[in-house]
Image: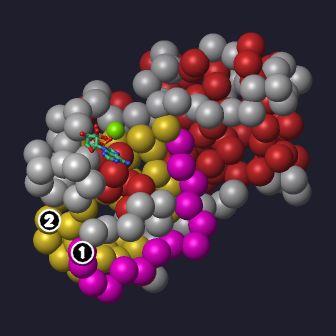
């Protein structure tokens, strides 16, 4: 099943000399994985935003967009005055049981009543990951989303993602500046320059 498809797309921002990418064709199906690589400023996040339907390409054909996209960024963007659990149930009100299970899997259960504003970056990134998973995405986009986690916490997050993928078969697109921190290191890469 095709979740995202685009034919010969380009992306150009007003006021910038050249396009970030041009004539890019990409199809993502259920269960597939993709890495986006390239230096800072190359357009990795912009391409992710195109895949999510948040950014329209400037040119191209045949755009097919996914219906449900889970996204997590380096910046967790939680609702600061709500608790951890409230942040999760705000997005997925019927998912209490799964929220509890995922918090436990990431050793965050004791913090479920803590205000989001009081969390460390790594703790907040774990909540943002769970929030993205709870919507049962067709595509999960991870944009340097787990950089604040120490290695044991990162490994638990990877295991949770892999376990959910085994159940739901979502496609995964990831950006990580650390090659040792890829959920699917053998995934094909799109290299932006
Ligand atoms: N909404 C926007 N409007 C104009 N320029 C943008 C916008 N978003 C990103 N850019 C610019 O496009 C370039 C690529 O940004 P980005 O996609 O964030 O790259 P990366 O994720 O690879 O670091 C940068 O130079 C950035 O400043
Ligand atoms: Mg980026």
Question: Quick one: which residue is furthest to the bottom in this view?
Answer: 62
At x 48%, y 60%, the residue is 54
Please state which of residues 127 and 164 is positioned toward the viewer in this rendering. 127
Magenta region = 59-72
**Residue 18 placement: quadrant:** bottom left
Whether residue 92 is situated above or below residue 59 in the rendered picture: above
Tell me the mark number nearer the camera, choosing from 2 and 1: 1
Q: Position of residue 136 (x, y in %)?
A: 66, 60
Residue 135 seen in the figure: yes
Q: Examine the residues drawn in magenta and state their main secondary structure.
A: strand
Q: Quadrant of ligand 1?
A: top left
Confirm whether the magenta stretch covers residue 114: no
Horizontal side of 88 relative to 6 (left or right) equals right
Confirm whether the magenta stretch covers residue 64: yes
| Residue at mark 2 to residue at mark 1: CA–CA distance | 8 Å
The residue carrying mark 1 is 59
Dot 2: element: strand
Callout 2 touching callout 1 (CB < 8 Å): yes
**Residue 60 placement: quadrant:** bottom left
Please state which of residues 115 and 185 is positioned toward the viewer in this rendering. 115
The disc, 2 or 1, on the residue closer to the chain's N-terminal end is 2
Which quadrant: the C terminus?
top left
Whether residue 173 is situated above or below residue 107 in the rendered picture: below
The residue carrying mark 2 is 22
Q: Residues within 10 Å of mark 2 (few under 14, many from 20)?
A: some
Q: Position of residue 80 (x, y in %)?
A: 75, 26
């Amino acid at each position: 099943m095709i979740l995202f498809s685009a034919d010969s797309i380009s992306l150009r921002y007003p006021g910038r000399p050249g396009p970030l990418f041009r004539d890019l064709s990409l199809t993502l199906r259920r269960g597939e994985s993709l890495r986006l690589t390239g230096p800072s400023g190359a357009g990795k996040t912009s391409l992710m935003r195109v895949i999510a339907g948040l950014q329209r390409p400037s040119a191209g054909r045949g755009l097919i967009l996914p219906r449900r996209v889970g996204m997590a960024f380096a910046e967790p963007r939680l609702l600061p005055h709500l608790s951890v659990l409230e942040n999760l149930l705000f997005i997925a009100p019927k998912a209490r049981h799964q929220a509890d299970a995922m918090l436990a899997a990431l050793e965050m259960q004791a913090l479920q009543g803590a205000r989001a504003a009081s969390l460390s970056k790594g703790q907040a990134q774990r909540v943002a990951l769970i929030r993205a998973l709870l919507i049962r995405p067709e595509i999960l986009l991870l944009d340097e989303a787990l950089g604040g986690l120490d290695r044991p916490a990162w490994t638990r997050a990877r295991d949770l993602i892999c376990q959910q993928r085994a159940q739901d078969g979502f496609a995964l697109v990831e950006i990580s500046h650390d090659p040792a921190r890829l959920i699917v290191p053998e995934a094909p890469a799109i290299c932006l320059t």
